[in-house]
């Protein structure tokens, strides 16, 4: 495994600035976000990454499959992931239909089983399209507190079950979202892991729980068993640091990346096996 910067950790940076920052700090990979890529331009973003000798560890994000007209946007996201040669397209599947993140409740559905069924139906359409484009879809289960508005997939077991029928559909193991799950190690062992994302879970959470991600070591997560399990499951891709935190975003991005590298080396990086 090697370290990757998810662009959202240094939210102030454009694609160009983030690519330059990765090269400056000796990183080999970057996780990109679609809106930033759109601002830079898809072809320009792909060229920046290539010219810097980086790989795209993930593209965030597709999904929100429980809403109306989701398929067309996800086809565009798949095409973008293919153009960037991204290792995977992260899929945040969406919450209850009509519940919009960050907005007051209007008309919405309380039918959670139907929302989950719609996710499965959408994958039946999108997985073959992605396969033709050579793109892997990575389902990301989110912590249960986001079930209503962001992801009706709350556990790794749910994500594994949905991914199982498709060769090109796997999962994201994000420490923030899965650390609490008593089945997490068992489910990691059976998972097709397409992305491993790390950050810490802060206590107390801020008023906006979306911003409750912290730098590794600042919260309650024990990263060792999770990283060991991910490696034992055969994952040898990038470890992507993805932090949503207002205080982190306000800091100098170069300082954030330098601290990220130090924390990764101390808390996340697998310990080499002894020689002899």
Image (spheres, rainbow, N blue to C red):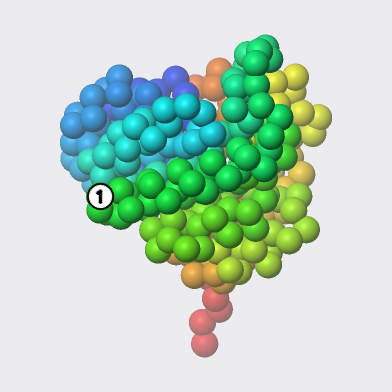
182 up-or-down from 20: above or below = below
Q: Is residue 230 left or right of residue 23?
A: right
Report x, y in % for residue 35.
37, 24
Which residue is pictured at 54% across the width and 69% down the height? 233
Quadrant for residue 270, please give it: bottom right
Quadrant for residue 90, please give it: top left
Front in this rendered view, residue 125 or 82: 125
Q: Residues within 10 Å of mark 1 (few under 14, many from 20)?
A: some
Which element carries disc 1, helix, strand or loop? helix
Front in this rendered view, residue 162 or 11: 162
Report x, y in % for residue 68.
47, 27
Which residue is pictured at 31% across the width and 28% down the height? 37
Q: Is residue 31 left or right of residue 55?
A: right
195 up-or-down from 259: above or below = below
Q: Is residue 250 left or right of residue 200?
A: left
Report x, y in % for residue 192.
49, 63
Q: Is residue 170 visible?
A: yes
Front in this rendered view, residue 21 or 82: 82
Total count of labels: 1
Which residue is pictured at 42% across the width and 28% down the height? 69
Q: Is residue 1 visible?
A: no
Report x, y in % for residue 237.
43, 58
- Tell me the residue that label 1 is attached to: 133
Instruction: Give the residue furthest to the bottom.
Output: 276
Which residue is pictured at 50% across the width and 33% down the height? 64
């Amino acid at each position: 495994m090697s370290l990757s910067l998810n662009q959202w950790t240094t939210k102030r940076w454009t694609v160009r600035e983030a690519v330059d920052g990765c090269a400056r700090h000796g990183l080999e990979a970057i996780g990109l976000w679609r809106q930033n890529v759109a601002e830079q331009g898809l072809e320009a973003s792909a060229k920046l990454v290539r010219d810097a000798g980086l790989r795209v560890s993930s593209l965030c994000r597709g999904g929100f499959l429980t809403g109306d007209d989701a398929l067309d946007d996800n086809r565009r996201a798949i095409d973008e992931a293919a153009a960037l040669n991204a290792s995977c397209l992260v899929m945040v599947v969406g919450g209850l239909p009509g519940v919009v993140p960050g907005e007051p409740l209007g008309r919405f559905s309380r039918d959670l089983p139907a929302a989950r069924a719609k996710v499965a139906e959408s994958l039946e359409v999108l997985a073959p399209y992605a396969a033709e484009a050579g793109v892997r879809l990575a389902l990301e289960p989110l912590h249960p507190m986001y079930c209503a508005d962001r992801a009706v997939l709350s556990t790794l077991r749910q994500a594994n079950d949905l991914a199982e029928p498709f060769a090109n559909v796997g999962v994201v193991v994000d420490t923030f979202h899965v650390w609490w799950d008593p089945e997490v190690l068992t489910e990691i062992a059976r998972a097709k892991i397409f992305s491993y994302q790390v950050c810490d879970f802060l206590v107390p959470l801020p008023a906006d729980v979306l911003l409750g991600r912290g730098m590794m070591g600042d919260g309650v997560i024990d990263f060792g068993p999770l990283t060991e399990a991910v490696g034992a499951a055969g994952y040898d891709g990038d470890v992507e640091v993805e932090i949503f935190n207002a205080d982190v975003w306000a800091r100098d991005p170069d300082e954030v990346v330098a601290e990220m590298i130090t924390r990764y080396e101390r808390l996340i990086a697998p310990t080499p096996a002894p020689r002899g």
